[in-house]
């Protein structure tokens, strides 16, 4: 089952991890730089989850780089369980954060009050979209590694 | 691999499906009966997804009842792929709907405006909680059936 593209320790997995880290950083920056994000629970939740996803993805990207260059794949059952559980929880949390943020931004636009100047609303929307893309890549990593673990 | 509790065609799977249908119906009723739910996109999305989840769960519950009483398990690869793909998409959508609804309700309480009388806000919260429970059961069904499919 070494041929599954995207499984732990392959070049495809490395690109997934780098994509996750990139989109998480983008989401975090769009949400937090120069914007008062702490006025809504959903926005604080998004910042928290992106702050968890960035170190997770970069750590696993470094492990992937090690596996690719040294040629030794760390596919011990214990390691795989940790990777799958981490991807699973972070993918659920990032989807939840992205959807909650999108819902709040939509309701802010809808109420049309003074709560959402157009400039900020656009940045919130971009941040939610980046978090969504980050979720897509995390869920892909999770599914591939779960499939690998089940078929070992 | 017949021993996996909750896999397609077992009594545990039937109870999961009945739980999904129950919580979806509860979420739909709390959101839609006597409340103007169509004022926010997230609420309409929740109603749509619960409206999809109810027939899906009841259909699979009937298939489970057939499997249990007749003793013939419909575990053809094609059927399993359809069940896993359906559970997968509906679990993602129901989590997204529950989180978007929860985010909107939270922002409505926060803005403290005339948009959310306490009576309605409580009902929206209960509806989001029911959708969340429905997601938990759908995700369980998905994971068990994916594991079964991967190990076949």
Image (tube, coloured by chain):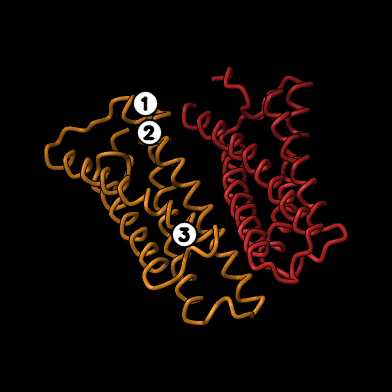
Chain colours: A orange, B red
Compared with A122, A60 (above or below) is: above
Q: Describe residue A25's horizontal placement relative to residue B19 as left or right.
A: left
Rendered residue at 71%/71% (across/down): B113
Label 3 marks a residue whose chain is A
Question: For the view shown, which residue lies furthest in the left direction?
Answer: A70
What residue is disc 2 on? A148
Rendered residue at 58%/37% (across/down): B142
Rendered residue at 49%/48% (across/down): A93
Q: Residues within 10 Å of mark 3 (few under 14, many from 20)?
A: many
Q: Position of residue A150 (x, y in %)?
A: 43, 29
Question: What number is the disc on residue A132?
Answer: 3
Circles 2, 1 touching at the beta carbon (< 8 Å): yes
Quarter of the picture holding the C terminus of chain A = top left
Q: Describe residue A26's horizontal placement relative to residue B61 as left or right.
A: left
Q: Are marks 2 and 1 on the same chain?
A: yes
Label 2 marks a residue whose chain is A
């Amino acid at each position: 089952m070494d041929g599954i593209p995207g499984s732990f320790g392959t070049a495809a997995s490395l690109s997934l991890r780098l994509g996750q880290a990139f989109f998480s950083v983008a989401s975090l920056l769009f949400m937090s730089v120069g914007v008062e994000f702490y006025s809504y629970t959903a926005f604080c939740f998004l910042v928290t989850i992106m702050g968890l996803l960035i170190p997770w993805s970069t750590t696993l990207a470094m492990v992937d780089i090690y596996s690719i260059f040294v040629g030794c794949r760390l596919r011990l059952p214990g390691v795989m369980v940790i990777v799958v559980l981490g991807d699973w929880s972070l993918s659920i949390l990032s989807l939840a954060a992205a959807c909650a943020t999108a819902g709040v931004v939509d309701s802010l636009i809808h109420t049309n009050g003074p709560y959402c100047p157009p400039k900020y609303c656009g940045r919130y929307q971009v941040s939610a979209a980046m978090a969504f893309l980050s979720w897509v890549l995390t869920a892909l990593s999770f599914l591939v590694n779960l499939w690998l673990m089940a078929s070992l």
